[in-house]
Image (tube, helix red, strand yellow):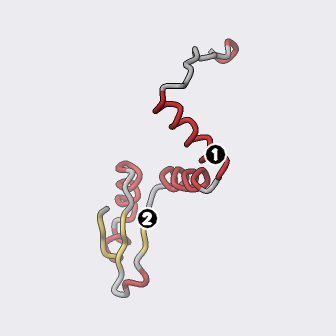
Amino acid sequence: MDAVAYSNFRQKLKDYMRQVNDDSDALIVTSKNSEENIVVMGKRDYDAMQETMRVLSNNYLMDKIKQGDQQFAKGTFKTHDLITDENNG
């Protein structure tokens, strides 16, 4: 994760916004007062992080994931053909 001073960030805001979105890497914007430092990230990455947090905090989903991991590790899983909706291609 790169860091940039606030004044430089402000001067090149559009460039940094493009960089954050293109690289999918957050950017630390620093200030003289370290309590005011911020992290800038793309909305797509933020949304993905929020969804991950929702899944991780959902005990039911986490139990299903763990169950699937155990089945895969033991080789006790079944494979199925992909079902396609003929109306949607």
* Whole-percent x, y for residue 23 in the image: 35, 50
Residue occupying image coordinates x 48% and y 25%: 75
Q: Which of 76 and 60 is in front in this view?
A: 76
Residue occupying image coordinates x 36% and y 60%: 16
Image height of 17 relative to 3, above or below: above
Image height of 7 relative to 54, above or below: below
Name the image quarter holding the N terminus.
bottom left
| Residue receiving disc 2 | 40
* Whole-percent x, y for residue 18 in the image: 38, 53
Q: How far apart are marks 2 and 1 (CA)?
A: 29 Å
Q: Furthest-front residue in view? A: 74
Name the image quarter holding the C terminus.
top right
Q: Is mark 1 on a helix, strand or loop?
A: helix
Q: Quadrant of residue 6?
A: bottom left
| Residue receiving disc 1 | 61
Q: Which amino acid does label 2 sit on?
A: Val
Image height of 22 relative to 85, above or below: below
Answer with left or right where residue 64 lies relative to residue 13.
Answer: right
- Mark 2, Cα crowd under 10 Å, few <14 / some 14-19 / many 20+, is some
Q: What element carries label 2?
A: strand
* Whole-percent x, y for residue 12 in the image: 34, 65
Q: In which quarter of the image is residue 78?
A: top right
